Amino acid sequence: MASTALTVRARSRALPRRCAVATTVTAAALALVGATLPAPRPAGIGDHLFPRLGNPGYDVRAYDISFDYSGDNSEPLRARTRIDAQVTAGNMDRFNLDFAGGKVSSVEVNGLPAEHARAGEDLVVTPRTPLRRGSWLHVEVRHTSDPKTKNGGWVRTKDGLAMANQADAAHRVFPSNDHPADKAMFTFHVRAPKELTVVAGGLPAGRTRAGDGNEDTVWTYRMGHPMATELAQISIGRSTVVHETGPHGLPLRHVVPAKQRKALAPWLKRTSDQIAWMERRAGRYPFENYGVLAAEAQTGFELETQTLSLFESDLLANPAYPSWYKESLMVHELAHQWFGDSVSPHRWTDLWLNEGHATWYEWAYAAERGGFTVEERARASYELSDSWRKRYGPPAALLPAQGDGKIELFSPIVYNGSAVVLYALRERIGKDAFARLEREWTHRYRDDNADTGDFIALAGEVSGEDQSAFLKKWLYGKTTPPMPGHPDWKQKSPEEQRKSLEKTPGKSHGPVDKGAREAERPAGQG
């Protein structure tokens, strides 16, 4: 987002694939019956796991979002969302936005009032004149954003708010095309009482006083690179911002509760070395800055929001967790800045590329600092892989939600099971080829979307041998293939593994604890 040229390059590469889907689906969705538009209904771009997420017919290029926070995190925020998009379907009489977390007072399209109606978790907008393919679409929605929305993206902290929109919660915060396939530029403006601190992803772009008595402050932040809606982050609270410098002058800014600054300082100082460690493996850090957001909230998860990763402050400050474990979780979310944030999934079935890689680097970092070895983690996870595949589906073919239930998206098969796939690939192609693959992946698809097929093709290109048959068995098979180089590794039931681990001295946290911890995330959160 720092470079317009970089943004145009990334968008032009990702657009054709989305346009093909959008045009086909929109033509069917907007077919007229006589001269009357059909009743508003939810749309979607055909994601296997979230069929009603995303909307066909347009490609969002930028969001400009304003929130007005009163100081009470139980009250809805007044908000305004502006969307700049390009129409990808022809003669579009109406279009959908994902939005379900507030009340809408007005909608304008290209400067003119537009009709709007609700349909499920969609906001269906009918402009005064049809939209033509290739034209620009400027939308302004005035609405509220309610922190108490069920499965919403706002996290209510002890002193304010933070965001956790993964996977399908951003549209319960602001109107959007809520699917990672449609990345866009973001600008945030937040008005809050002057005694509070507001920090959002990206770089600060201004701060002004507001109100007759200057009792409020308006904070503005802009992302420097395209971002998926699920990765947006805004922190509002009685916070301290700690500024440091990372590798090659990278700005670091950490957001912590003021009263916990001293306790959290040792962990924040590890960030620069962690970034340097990741850069040696995945290439140069892909964004304009980075930092840790330590929130006073009990979420049960940590989250890789772009440039500002969300952590529970008590997790980092708690001496009961060994240092290697906490640091490895920090590296897990940091690794996502490359794998998931910069290179984003094309569909949610490609989530294994995000979580498998982040888990892989979590394992490697922990092993260097007194945790389990990568082989120990891989073997323990391999032994349970068949049971995970049966319950959740294979890594790249997760089972969809049953009925009206929530999908079990963040499961051990997506974390540990997917890291096992990477371990198997490294055993097959060798450490050197695997290292080249990792760096080429993050370089080739930077600021873009990529899918499982792209990874399989690149693995073959880098290794000099077609890896399709090998990887498809690991990614789509109902049972786990034999591990290359380890014919003695066998599948076990959870009870069998537990009994065998009890006979072996542990390191205070089991080799599959991360996967188990993430599997307990609240429904709808990442």
Image (cartoon, helix red, strand yellow):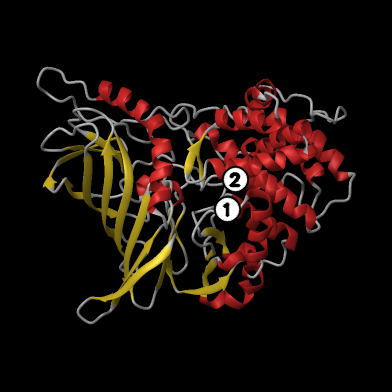
Q: Which residue is mark 1?
A: 300
Marked residue nearer the N-terminal end (2 or 1): 1
The one of 17 and 78 positioned closer to us in this rendering: 17
Cα distance in 3D space between marks 2 and 1: 7 Å
- How crowded is the residue under tag 1: few (<14 C-alpha within 10 Å), some, or many (20+)? some
- Contact flag, marks 2 and 1 (Cβ < 8 Å): yes
Q: Is residue 472 left or right of residue 497?
A: left
Q: Quadrant of residue 460?
A: top right
- Residue type at mark 1 is Gly
Identity of the residue drawn at 74% across and 50% down? 364
Identity of the residue drawn at 33% across and 74% down? 193
Give the percent coordinates (x, y) of residue 49: 48, 30
Identity of the residue drawn at 43% across and 37% down? 13
Q: Which residue is mark 2?
A: 520
- Up the image or down, 40 lies above or below 252; here it is above
Give the percent coordinates (x, y) of residue 387: 70, 29
